[in-house]
Amino acid sequence: MTLKEEQLDIVLSLAQLDISQEEKTQYLTQLQSILNQMTALDQFDLGQIPPFETGSLTSSELREDKVEPSKDLMLGVNAPHWELHCFRVPKII
Amino acid sequence: MLLIGNYIVLGFRKLFKVMLFSSVSQLHHAFKSRQLKVVDFLKQTLAHIHKTDAEFNAFLSLSETPGLMASAETLDIAYDRGENLPLLAGIPIAIKDNICIQSQKTTCASKMLSEFISPYDATVIQKLRSHHVLMVGKTNMDEFAMGSSTENSAFFPSKNPWNRECVPGGSSGGSAVAVASGQSVISLGSDTGGSIRQPAAFCGIVGLKPTYGLVSRYGLVAFASSLDQIGPFARTVEDAAILLEAIAGKDPHDATSASYSFIKPSFENLSIKGLKIGLPQELFSDAISDDVKQTVLTAVEVLKSEGALVETVSMSSFQAALSAYYIIAPAEASSNLARFDGVRYTYRSENPETLSDLFKKSRGQGFGSEVKRRIILGTYVLSSGYYDAYYLKAQKLRTLIKEDFKRIFNTFDVILSPTTPSTAFKFGAHLQNPLAMYMADIATIPANMAGLPSLSIPCGFSSEKLPIGMQLTGKAFDDALLLKIGHVFQSKTTHHQRYPEGVFHGV
């Protein structure tokens, strides 16, 4: 399958990524060679094989659903532009 | 026991070397018998890190010395009182920088998280705290664990202690360098497609990817959740087993963690007589360098001489495992990394015009080249029109890989292969060709795809004096068997006792 720049633009939009034209050109070549490698899958008859569903090797057990006190998320150090008990968000409208 | 008994004979300089390359059991005995103080060992370790890390770049951040010294002093008081402390009490450990430690930076070697302070401890860290280990610092890695050389770190690459012109492997390269250079006795890494075993092989140490679910992933920054697993690095198999025992077990915070605990097996009077070992012919093909192949086959002879039965097997699905992995792992990564949006986790682009612009610019600037490549690839294979052609096929092949392993384990106890197709490569060798870099994972990926335990142990050196690793892969939750075989091998060989020349340069 050939990857075209228009397809790459759609993928970049879906992935919420802004990259330079130079990066686009580089990625197009590299991704094409990676996708060509994927044809190795075509040598197997996978028609009747069920897809792998979970990485878990045992049945999953969910913990008891109980309310716990909120953890300190340390927003004071982790949110950008923190001041006066609030963190600033950029003006975007 | 070489420690204090040889102090006068060896002199301080040699004693220092012996101390830094001692095993957990040796150090525990020395602490307990009061031949060595925890504080003194910690001081020597920190001095060694400060002297050598400008050269090796194993660490991204170091823990605050006063806090570490206070913990060490408390442990010395407890040892003085004769308290029965865990084997790991007072042992310095390095932690890969994608595992959260409360109130410390967890950067994943990414600009996106360069100032992020974790508000909580990963479960493995909580467990280690209960064993009173001394966490000396966070280690370098490929950004978000994507890579095989640490060259994808946003900060700097780590260097291989055996040859500083070569990569240490990755993504857990910093953790491997820390142990190989004597900067820490043991360390933690994570393995999604070989990120513990490949750097262990390149740096001449032991690395274990435990069975998926044996160790909780809570607090490990997710890359590909169905493949990620935390595991130990050590110089001996026994130390790896001690560390695994400390971190394994069911965790209510991780629904994929299994109701299994791991108890370190006894390494006394072990026998591997009659053990059936399969050598997959696909992993002894022309893709593997002659040096590596011959060294691993020589190591196989050691196991044969101990009574193991060895036969060649075929696993046809291995040929396409790499392709399937590089569909599934990026697909999961594209989803997991969607949370890094410029609103949370510290990095934000300047002057966005719209909310969408904020997301796109922050992600475009905050992520490095390899991470963006994998996000794009993952988004593509999951998108409408391509899902069936790529993602669905890859998941079907994953089923085939699992079935192939199951078939072989009906006859064999373990599978043995080289860990890597070559020894450590030079910096820059594969940077412009991602596919060549991905090939470094060809032997390690199948175990991740099937969730199986897999151990890399040093088994010799190349003609260029670079370490070579041998990989043992077993049935799910048969981690103990791999460690037993590894211990038998180490008891008959001395590869693991060598350390890199020049590690003590200037000391």
Image: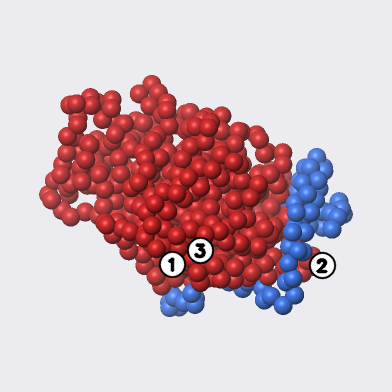
Judge by depth and name the residue closer to the eye, B507 or B452: B452
Q: Which residue is mark 2?
A: B385
Give the quarter of the figure containing the C terminus of chain B. Answer: top left
Q: Which residue is mark 1?
A: B477
Q: Chain B, which colour? A: red
Q: Identify the mark nearer the N-term, 3 or 1.
A: 3
Task: Classify 10 Å Cα crowding around label 1: few (below 14), some (14-19), many (20 and above).
Answer: many
Q: Are marks 1 and 2 on the same chain?
A: yes
Judge by depth and name the residue closer to the eye, B480 or B17: B480
Residue B500 visible somewhere in the drawing: yes
Q: Chain of mark 2?
A: B
Give residue A83's position: percent from left, percent from top: 53, 48
Give residue A22's position: percent from left, percent from top: 80, 40
Q: Which residue is mark 3?
A: B452
Residue type marked 1: Phe
Q: Chain of mark 3?
A: B
Q: Secondary structure at mark 1?
A: loop
Which chain is the one coloured blue?
A
On screen, residue B5 above or below B297 = above
- Spatial CA span between label 3 and label 1: 8 Å
Residue type marked 3: Leu
For residue A42, side relative to residue B66 (left or right): right
Q: Identify the mark nearer the N-term, 3 or 2.
A: 2
Task: Classify 10 Å Cα crowding around label 3: few (below 14), some (14-19), many (20 and above).
Answer: many
Residue located 21% across and 54% down the image = B85
Residue located 49% across and 77% down the image = A59
- Spatial CA span between label 3 and label 2: 32 Å
Task: Classify 10 Å Cα crowding around label 2: few (below 14), some (14-19), many (20 and above).
Answer: few
Residue located 57% across and 50% down the image = B145
Q: Chain of mark 1?
A: B
On screen, residue A77 above or below B323 = above
Judge by depth and name the residue closer to the eye, B346 or B58: B58
